Amino acid sequence: MPAPVRTSARSRGFTLVEMVLVISLLGLIAALVMVLASRPLAGYAELQRRAELTHIAQSVMHTMARDIRSALPNSLRISGNALELIRASGAYRYRAQHSDQAGSDILDFTQADSSFQVLGAASLPAGSRLVILHTGQSGADAYAGDSVITPATTALTVAGGGAESLVTLSAPQQFPFASPRQRVYVIDTPVSYLCDTATGQLTRYQAYALLAAQPTSAAVAPLATAARALTASKVTACSFSYSPGTPARSALVTLAITVSDGTERVRLLEQVHVNNGI
């Protein structure tokens, strides 16, 4: 009869108590690792959100500042969270005195005139209009359609180039006031920015008709049918202010935009100088 096989203590399996202890220790270690790893991950996520918000705010400021710097002098107006301006695509000096050369054509302010010369090679894109001495006051308000601006129905053509260009109007016009700097502006479209904190959107509008009263609602004309583009989302606060210029200094626009995402919030403030050389 064979002898019984003896089992040593080392060949025994784990007891239930030992398995429970090992599992508990592994769980504790895993929990500690998760706690230690979650903090850097959460910090990285917050950093990413903050960077995105900063990018949104900076993009808004860049877009608005670009439009403001190209504004027709004295055309910027603000009503609450709505900002409007008339965008100028160019400016030229018109001829105010005859030269010794034959064929010089001045801009006559004493009667309706249909042609005049400007210095340099002028560019008049289709749909452009001319403005001279827009002050925003009664009788010199381009928004109101005063004679400081050519009608939308008046076609403009340009000939020549080099030292001087000849500008011709399809219908004669008498501009009421001469510019102290002999400056005529070429404008193309009004531009509006509306900030709606209820929807968190800042929207840009263009290519609509000029109105004497500033449009402030996207639901009615002219903004309801205007070309629009979403400038920014996640906007929770907007503030626009305008300080008119003087002969000694340019006008100043102050823009404040706040964008938020969860607990993260970024607020940018920028001041933009506005050309007021009329």
Image (tube, rainbow, N blue to C red):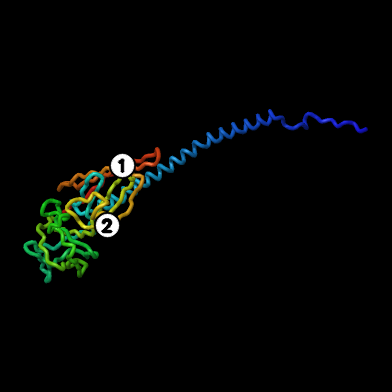
- Viewer can see residue 53: yes
Discs 1/2, front:
2
Query: Three-letter amino acid code at disc 2?
Result: Thr
Please give the residue where the numbered disc 1 appears in the rendered image. 237
Label 2: how many residues lie within 10 Å, few (<14), some (14-19) or many (20+)?
some
Question: Residue 23 at x, y = what percent?
Answer: 64, 32
Quarter of image, res 20: top right
Please, which residue is most extreme toward the bottom here? 102
Classed neighbour count for the residue bearing mark 1: other residues with Cα under 10 Å, few (<14), some (14–19), many (≥20): some
Seen in the picture, residue 232 relative to 151 is either above or below; the reply is above
108 or 255, which is in the foreground?
Answer: 255
Quarter of the image with the N terminus is: top right
Residue 52 is situated, as x and y percent measured from the top left of the image, at 40, 45
What is the x, y in percent for residue 266?
36, 41
Taking depth in this image into account, of 158 and 188 the one nearest to the observer is: 188
Q: Position of residue 48 (x, y in %)?
A: 43, 43
Q: Nearer the viewer, residue 171 or 269?
A: 171
Give the structural element (helix, strand or loop) at label 1: strand
Residue at the spot of label 2:
225
